[in-house]
Image (cartoon, coloured by chain):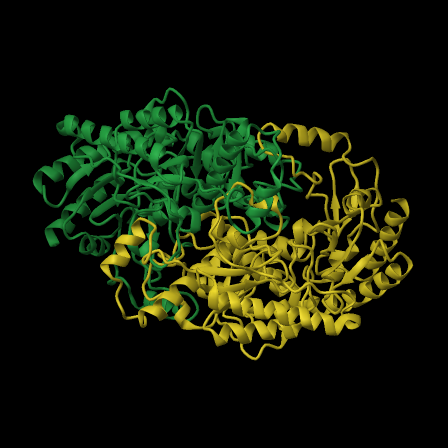
Chain colours: A green, B yellow
Amino acid sequence: MGSAPYSSAANQLSTLLADEPSGPSIQVAIPGPKAKAVADDLNAVFDTRALNMVADYRKSHGNYIVDPDGNVLLDVYAQIASIPVGYNNPALLAAAQSEEMAQALINRPALGNFPSVDWADILRSGILKVAPPGLDQVFTALAGSDANETAYKAAFMWRRQKERGGPSVEFTEEEMNSAMVNHGPGAPDLSILSFKSAFHGRLFGSLSTTRSKPIHKLDIPAFDWPRATFPEIKYPLEEHAEENAKAEAAALAEVEDLILNFHSPPAAVVVEPIQSEGGDNHASPAFFRGLREVTRKHGVLMIVDEVQTGVGATGKFWAHEHWNLPHPPDMVTFSKKAQTAGYYFGNPELRPNKPYRQFNTWMGDPARALLFRAIIDYIQKNDLVAQTARVGDYLFGKLEKLAAQYPDQFANLRGKGQGTFIAFDNPKRDAFLAKAKTFGVNIGGSGANAVRLRPMLIFQEKHADILIDALEKIVKSL
Amino acid sequence: MGSAPYSSAANQLSTLLADEPSGPSIQVAIPGPKAKAVADDLNAVFDTRALNMVADYRKSHGNYIVDPDGNVLLDVYAQIASIPVGYNNPALLAAAQSEEMAQALINRPALGNFPSVDWADILRSGILKVAPPGLDQVFTALAGSDANETAYKAAFMWRRQKERGGPSVEFTEEEMNSAMVNHGPGAPDLSILSFKSAFHGRLFGSLSTTRSKPIHKLDIPAFDWPRATFPEIKYPLEEHAEENAKAEAAALAEVEDLILNFHSPPAAVVVEPIQSEGGDNHASPAFFRGLREVTRKHGVLMIVDEVQTGVGATGKFWAHEHWNLPHPPDMVTFSKKAQTAGYYFGNPELRPNKPYRQFNTWMGDPARALLFRAIIDYIQKNDLVAQTARVGDYLFGKLEKLAAQYPDQFANLRGKGQGTFIAFDNPKRDAFLAKAKTFGVNIGGSGANAVRLRPMLIFQEKHADILIDALEKIVKSL
């Protein structure tokens, strides 16, 4: 038991990278005839209007994604930041082909009722091995949205338990009856505070805390929950220290005001270390320490949403490790590069006072937990978090030079010291992203104008060079 | 392409059943020492208070679940009705060990942006092959809760589009600005109507439509959405036809009244064919036809939640096929025995007018879609829906005899003609379920007093005989 049964040879990063294409290669304009045929066929049964490109994953390898027309692109978008260690990674393939994985796939348990004999071991040798400092328990979920929503539920139950007088105080008849018709006091008038431009998911509770773009929210009923201003930071950070500090102090004051005065009191504040969908908006470690302080002061929980920032991309396993918090967050949510999802917590009081309050049929997926274990092993054995920190610094240095040369095209360059989690603004962003494909690079955007770089953890200096070369060609062509 | 690469020999039901234990076998009282040790160990990192029994899935087979102490139980609960064709089914094992599955596991795409070349084929040769009549498109999700919530989102967007004047009418500035602060008109005051005792999931939107038990809802903020009475039916149905018809007419009148007069107008009505978590509450096909009529009359969508009833257990692939609806439901949601999730729809207008409105990173899981394809193949090749109808009739006949002998112990026996989707009430229900394990049967409950039978689709007459024998022993021992 413990680690997945793959050979140490297959485990080497060098093996994976040696088999990569030597660089991008564009055979036909994208989408080519084969990609078009696939998309047309798919459109009959599945909405394809968000289609970016069709991929042939059998032929994709490492940092490179391949399309059905044979085009090979360096992929620094990586399935919206969710591929951790490359396409067709042999170590993950070995885990996927293990007897344990087949078992997990075909005998999927209702984990809360009928856990398997090895579930504790799967958690300890995987998900919990990378638990953020101070957090030693986990609730497993399926994707970022339900990870956040179950964390919110834990926060509401914790808050009401405290108000009620502790775990042993029974629910009143009035609470039980009113809950069944969605009224207070059983369905309480409490809230989750989130920030302007935040993204926390798209189901009804998580979407109520998402504040990224109207298109994400229009026509969907939402809870009347409070929204605080996320500090509007200027870059480079070093040159705007004073005004940025003022913006952060103002944002913290607004948070405190909303905690004290919003009509529906927040049980928790949810925050991303870097607002990822909202445009790669940063704040300083001091801001987050301040947020920890103000939430603790008022008995409000702090939930750190690491769905996009987690699992190494910022040069720490968890981005909030950059903050040196004196007290850990109350909950940290994860998904994407973990290939599974859930939330970590440390305080036993975040287990609700009775069973079946935080529960569902599957409560996660052991097959995906096994894959995360293999990902963690691979990251640790190949020291990929440190590599990402190093390569990020290298890439950022190159980007600074490009930005000096083309200041309008690489505006507000940000993410220094944050691994490869780097972004910049471009005035013709959508054209920039489309043009990138013609130069063999798959890149994503975020917010209104940002180009966001989200390479995998196997991205090295040589890939950074290819990327930098392509970026210059793109801006010259625009 | 098309079907998964397994041999026709491995595909045979007889192979699976020949390898089953000959019957239950209880070695030590449950939980035995090994199960206790596993539970204690797990409890340190994972909430185990809902634990029913620890399982050793490697040793479980077909209809039988095995625990770490070597106890063998006939499993008619099947992971809360979610194991379709038996533990360690060799056909599913072959699918799990296929190259295609390994690919799907390790190269998980963001399906809306970067679908794989074979995604249309995976859908057509699997999920869509069993689409309910009239519904030819699918939105894939991960579990029952998000399947329902994405269906609700589709309903809200459809409704507002209709109110706005069609897909080409642009959003107003006011809508876009108000949506960002969770207020109307952008975040509209619309609702989903559900029924008393319904269960539709546990995230914030789905939980607002769940009306099963206070423990599911307490302390969680909820939308003020309408709840209609589910007809309170008396059993056996034949003996109470007249009063049941009256109860159903009253419920339909209440639905119509809520549609017309509730302060937050319903965009959709969501209903389970049999209220499964709520206590196995049935209504007649005429009631559901009436519901289809009243929803169509008022331009309200009808969402049929087949998360628990779907995939064969009622003797039809979809339980709503029992109703002979003149017009299909607008959406049908699925999960559990499908081992994946989502909703079917037929009306192209249920695709929102713009991309990225119904979207998330993964939008389902191709690995789980491949497993559903193998499940569908297995069900069809072994004619398991027809078998379930036949075995259900056999089992119901035996239960009627038991009920005649012990009328108080098998009260309100229900599910006649509904395959093996059978339930009865017992005055000492919880003791009944605990005692069942001592006689080698794993059974679940629902609602306040119901014992619900949820065998897999490979349950045969010989298993029914074992179950009936155990049931008699249980009631004699109580």
Which quadrant of the figure contains the N terminus of chain A? top right
With respect to residue A251, does B119 lie above or below? Answer: below
Q: Position of residue A125 (x, y in %)?
A: 54, 31
Left or right, A208 with respect to B314, comes to left
x 25%, y 44%: residue? A279
Foreground pick, B51 / B238: B238
- Most extreme residue toward the top is A326
Displayed quadrant of residue A293: top left
With respect to residue A462, does B145 lie above or below? Answer: below
x 82%, y 62%: residue? B461
Q: Is residue A148 visible to us here?
A: yes
Q: Position of residue A240 (x, y in %)?
A: 14, 29
Q: Position of residue B23 (x, y in %)?
A: 84, 50
With respect to residue A165, does B109 lie above or below? Answer: below
Left or right, A424 with respect to A331, comes to left
Left or right, A130 with respect to A260, comes to right
Q: Is residue B143 visible to us here?
A: no
Q: Position of residue A334 (x, y in %)?
A: 43, 38
Left or right, B445 with respect to B110, comes to right
Which quadrant of the figure contains the C terminus of chain A? bottom left
x 78%, y 36%: residue? B30
> How many discs mark residues in the rendered view?
0
Foreground pick, B155 / B124: B155
- Most extreme residue toward the bottom is B326
Foreground pick, A238 / B382: A238
